[in-house]
Amino acid sequence: MILPRLRAAALATSALLVLAATPASAAGEADAVPKGAAVTVLKASKYCFGNIVEVSGIVMPRDEQQVRPDRFGLKVAEVKADPGDTVTAGQVLARLTDGANVINLTAPVAGTISASSAIVGAPASGKDALFSIIAKSEYDLVGMVPTRDIAKLKTEQTARLKISGAGEMDGKVRMIAPTIEPNSQLGHVFVAISSNPRLLVNSSGRAQIKTGQSCGVAVPLTAILYSTAGTVVQVVRGGRVETRRVETGLMSAGQVEIRDGIQEGDIVVARAGALLREGDPVRPVGASADAK
């Protein structure tokens, strides 16, 4: 009877030791999981950026026609059109007289009258133009481009323009000048304005010409931290912060191309900050469990 009792006591003691050790082990495992501030994270993903050449310039008529009488000795009898009017080909702009006969001065092309010097009673000679017409109401943004960007440009490339006083509109590269200015080393580019709103000649404008496309890993601008150590992105790995130096590239719509430093799928802190440092424990929010 004594032996069985001793065995039972030994078994009970072993069970108590196991139960006592289990919470300590669980606590040790819990301590191994980093605990820290909750941070919003996201995955670095692929994004396609447009390669852009920016151009500043002024609005100019693509083709401007001068309208004048074909002989001398005439006077203006009546003015039928004013600057700013839209006219059709063949429309009467003014009536001229030589004292005995009335002669109609007509528009050679359809378009917008940009200037007029016609005054009733004033002489109308074949020397000076009475009207200037912007043919077909077509305009170009004429800008200057650095030599390094000239090689990137081709006709028919699409552009997005912003014209002072007229807002935004689409356009295309129509022509690239074959020469450059020797002193400034800038070349002319002519961007055809696709729409035909009532534009003001000599208005300033800017064009963003899309010359190509580059696809690569990208993160939001807010995920990038600029410091004395360089440009960095904070990555979460194993529940802790890793600071990665990165090489940035193009930027568009709040996204920044990362050419080196992180890979697609890396978990990054959505809003990088100086308060987070290398090795800090964090609790990622908003990404997959891979960050934990």
Image (cartoon, grey):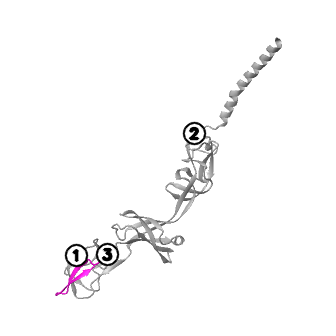
Tell us which disc is closer to us: 1 or 2. 1
Whether label 1 touches label 2, CB < 8 Å? no
Q: Which residues are magenta?
A: 88-106
Dot 3: element: loop
Residue under label 3, please give it: 110
Position of residue 153 in the picture relative to residue 26 (left or right): left
Residue under label 1, please give it: 80
Is residue 180 something that shows in the picture?
no
Dot 2: element: strand
Please, what is the three-letter code of the amino acid marked with disc 2? Ala
Residue 67: image tag:
none
Location of residue 105 with respect to 59 vertically, above or below: below
Whether label 1 touches label 3, CB < 8 Å? no
Q: Measure the C-alpha gap from mark 3 to mark 2.
A: 69 Å
Is residue 170 something that shows in the picture?
yes
Any magenta on residue 105? Answer: yes
Residue under label 2, please give it: 37
Residue lying at 54% horizontally and 58% vertically, measured from the top left: 48
Residue lying at 35% horizontally and 77% vertically, measured from the top left: 64
